[in-house]
Amino acid sequence: MMTDSLPDKVKKNLLDLQYNRYLQSYNTSIIVLFTFLIGIGIAFITKQIDYTSFNQMLAVATITIAVVAVIVLLMLQFKGHMSNILQEIKKLKL
């Protein structure tokens, strides 16, 4: 996006919109992560997952590690974008 010719006020508003988009994605990631973990917990409590079965535990562990890793990596990426946007906003002369 070519924002070099735009006034600082417009640049700030565009950066604010980007920040809000990343913040919403970050918050959604947190919600998805906790929903997944609560679902796994409920599955154990209701004995839908047999913790004595090696194959089931291996499948649950593999899926959990994959899901948590992806979500945490996305959260770190969103957090990095948000901090970069805040730095760009601070650089503007308003």
Image: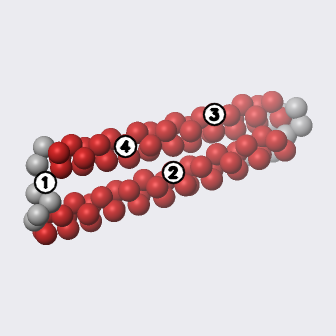
Q: Determine whether, in the image, residue 25 is placed left or right of residue 17.
A: left
Q: Amino acid at mark 4?
A: Phe
Q: What separation in Å lies between label 1 and label 2 (alpha carbons)?
A: 28 Å
Q: Amino acid at mark 1?
A: Ile
Q: Secondary structure at mark 2?
A: helix
Q: Residues within 10 Å of mark 3 (few under 14, many from 20)?
A: few
Farthest-out residue, right? 93
Which label is found at residue 75?
2
Q: What separation in Å lies between label 2 and label 4 (alpha carbons)?
A: 13 Å
Which comes sooner in the sequence, label 4 or label 1? 4
Q: Amino acid at mark 2?
A: Met
Count of labels in the image: 4
Which comes sooner in the sequence, label 3 or label 2? 3
Who's the residue at 48% across and 58% down the image? Answer: 73
Judge by depth and name the residue closer to the eye, 29 or 2: 29
Label 3 or label 2, whichever lies nearer to me, is: 2
Question: Disc 4 designates what residue?
Answer: 34
Q: Secondary structure at mark 1?
A: loop
Q: What separation in Å lies between label 4 and label 3 (alpha carbons)?
A: 26 Å
Q: Can residue 30 be seen in this snapshot?
A: yes
Question: Disc 3 designates what residue?
Answer: 17
Q: Residues within 10 Å of mark 1 (few under 14, many from 20)?
A: some
Query: Which quadrant would residue 60 be assigned to in this image?
Result: bottom left
Judge by depth and name the residue closer to the eye, 26 or 11: 26
Question: Residue 83: x percent and y percent?
Answer: 68, 48
Label 2 or label 4, whichever lies nearer to me, is: 4
Query: Which quadrant would residue 64 be assigned to in this image?
Result: bottom left
